[in-house]
Image (tube, rainbow, N blue to C red):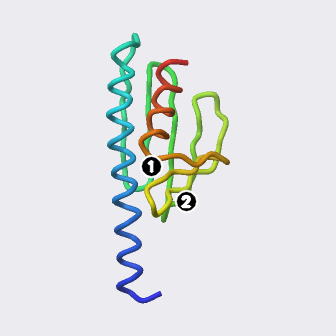
Amino acid sequence: MSATAAAAKDLLWRELWSSFASLLRSYCAAHGLSSEHQAILEVSAESILIRVNTKQMTLTQHEGKGSVTAADGSQQTLHLLEDGDVKIGRRTEAMDMAAERLAREILLT
């Protein structure tokens, strides 16, 4: 892969990760309206930590591949796909639907 192609790929992963973090913030805020607690998100280039009261969920990625560790400690693979979809475990869905589902899981369960 050329240096230009590698740089473009790196930019793609950063943009997808940033978009996913933004969607998670929005859906956590929306679900927080009907919850006793609000979510606190800590975002870095390779991780997103979502804390709600005593629960936490951690998402990690490097070059589009990583993991989701749920509040109960279970872990699934995470893949950001170039078309904007997200694959968590065996489930592939649009990025906004994945963010909504994860926000609902940590805030409403």
Q: Which amino acid does label 2 sit on?
A: Lys
| Number of marks in the rendered image | 2
Secondary structure at numbered mark 2? strand
Q: Nearer the viewer, residue 108 or 45?
A: 108
Residue with the mark numbered 1: 47
Instruction: Specify the farthest residue to the top.
Output: 36
Name which residue lies at 37% across and 44% down: 21
Horizontally, residue 64 falls left or right of residue 45, namely: right
Horizontally, residue 1 falls left or right of residue 71, namely: left
Residue with the mark numbered 2: 65
Q: Distance between the residues labelled 2 and 1?
A: 11 Å
Name which residue lies at 38% across and 28% down: 28
- Looking at marks 2 and 1 on the same chain, the residue that comes earlier in the sequence is marked by 1
Residue 82, percent from left and from top: 46, 64
Residue 55, percent from left and from top: 52, 24
Residue 46, percent from left and from top: 44, 55
Position of residue 58 relative to residue 55, above or below, is below
Number of residues whose C-alpha sits closer than 10 Å to that of mark 2, classed few (under 14), some (14–19) or many (20 or more): some
Position of residue 91 relative to residue 14, above or below, is above
Which of label 2 and label 1 is nearer to you?
Answer: 2
Secondary structure at numbered mark 1? strand
Number of residues whose C-alpha sits closer than 10 Å to that of mark 1, classed few (under 14), some (14–19) or many (20 or more): some
Q: Which amino acid does label 1 sit on?
A: Ser
Name which residue lies at 55% across and 18% down: 109
